[in-house]
Amino acid sequence: MASQPQKLAYVDAKLGAPSNGQQTTRILFNTIEAPGTTSSLTFFRSFQGLTNGQTNLTQNKLDSMESMVIKTIWLAQLDTSGALGFFGGLVQQTVSIIVGNQTVVKNLPIQFNQGLNGQAYDRLHENGGTGLDRNIPPTDTFQTNIPCEIRLLTDIVIPPQVAFEVRIDSNAGAYGTGAVVCALAGYGKIFSAGNSF
Amino acid sequence: MITAQDKILHVASKLGLSSLQNMQASTGAVYDVDTELSGQIFSQATRHANPSVTNINENQFEVNEALLVETIAFYVKDGSGNTLNFQNNYGSDAVIVFDLVIGNKRVMKDTPVFAAGTPYAFANNGAQAINSGETRTSIYAPRHQVFMEGAGILIPPQVQWYVSYTIFNVVTGAIVTPTDATAIGCYLFGTKVLLNFNTSI
């Protein structure tokens, strides 16, 4: 099985992309403020008005000498007081990742890896949280569940300068008035002047 | 698949460190706390108490010592010196955005560590605490770690390193300022190379 560095090097070579950047661990994230109740959310599409604490990109593509492999999708929903809730409530939702004009993750259900059903895809995954009938509601410093996370079984590559986005579909998911956050984590290369000048 | 030892020897070869391969391989971690609230960790370790705040005398390794960073974690140290959980002190909506700088190169770039529990940390939710109020309920102490899967980064001998960070509220985007009671600490864990006199003298 090819490792993440091998897969990234293979795809970069196929695309003719530079491969001499700094190898590192990369986590991209993007926030949508006050999403409310909706049937579709798209992360990494809008960066307007977001601070460095809400996203670490300024556009929905990596720089010309940067690329990465996605191994994990991470989703969180926070209310205005800072308490972590269940992402989209408990209704069934799917996630799709679109890179360029290609859907590379298609309608993957996310609900099993969070919430109360405890049927996570991977065997090491913890249950998503404690019971709903708890007598003490969660607060910002009293967290009773954990964010939704899915580890991908194959390495998904985001090449340099190709637009990408993450789409969540549901039937009226309740995302609240705080914010929802999506992070894509994995192995990547970042621009390194020392190697390229 | 390249191993940690392979990576250390590869980088050492690139840097011309021909004697590193004769040193003692080990497991190690370095830690420090930003007690000055300056936004940098490790860069002021020389002024910190050892081992209550840090376990290094300066933010560079000795000759023929190195660390392949494989895990980076953040925590909170309060005014009494207690080591605490970041989320329990800052709330689930906090996020640390950090850079790891080695020499004059930024090797980790704008990396978020979410208070709610970071990516990769799902396999274990960390320690559970029990609220001792009228109703006993489990709460989570989430992990605030970055596992550098597939890409450990070598801190070579005699090169300075530090972590630069800012804390934000991810909902509002506002900067959150730490206090003396909530100073941010960080550890770097991984495969360590220790000076081995038997082969070098």
Image (tube, rainbow, N blue to C red):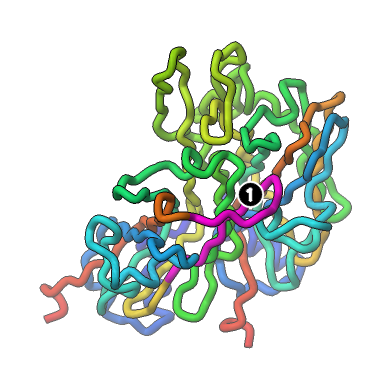
| Residue pointed to by mark 1 | B169
Type of residue at label 1? Asn
Question: Residue shown at 79%/52% (left/top)?
Answer: A44
Question: Between residues A108 and A35, which one lies in front from this camera angle?
Answer: A35
Q: Please identify the residue farthest to the bottom as the structure is shown.
A: A197
Label 1 crowding class (10 Å Cα cut-off): few <14, some 14-19, many 20+? many
Element carrying mark 1: strand
Question: Between residues A31 and B134, which one lies in front from this camera angle?
Answer: B134
Q: Is residue A154 left or right of residue B162?
A: right
Question: Residue shown at 53%/62% (left/top)?
Answer: B165
Q: Position of residue A26 (x, y in %)?
A: 60, 58
Count of numbered tags: 1
Does residue A2 show up? no
Label 1 is found on which chain of the structure? B
Question: Residue shown at 83%/57% (left/top)?
Answer: A48
Question: Which stretch is magenta?
Answer: B162-178
User: Which quadrant holds residue A40?
Assistant: top right
Q: Position of residue A118 (x, y in %)?
A: 58, 19
Question: Between residues A11 and A110, which one lies in front from this camera angle?
Answer: A110
Is B198 above or below relative to B70?
below
User: Which quadrant holds residue A63?
Assistant: bottom right
Is A33 above or below relative to B130?
below
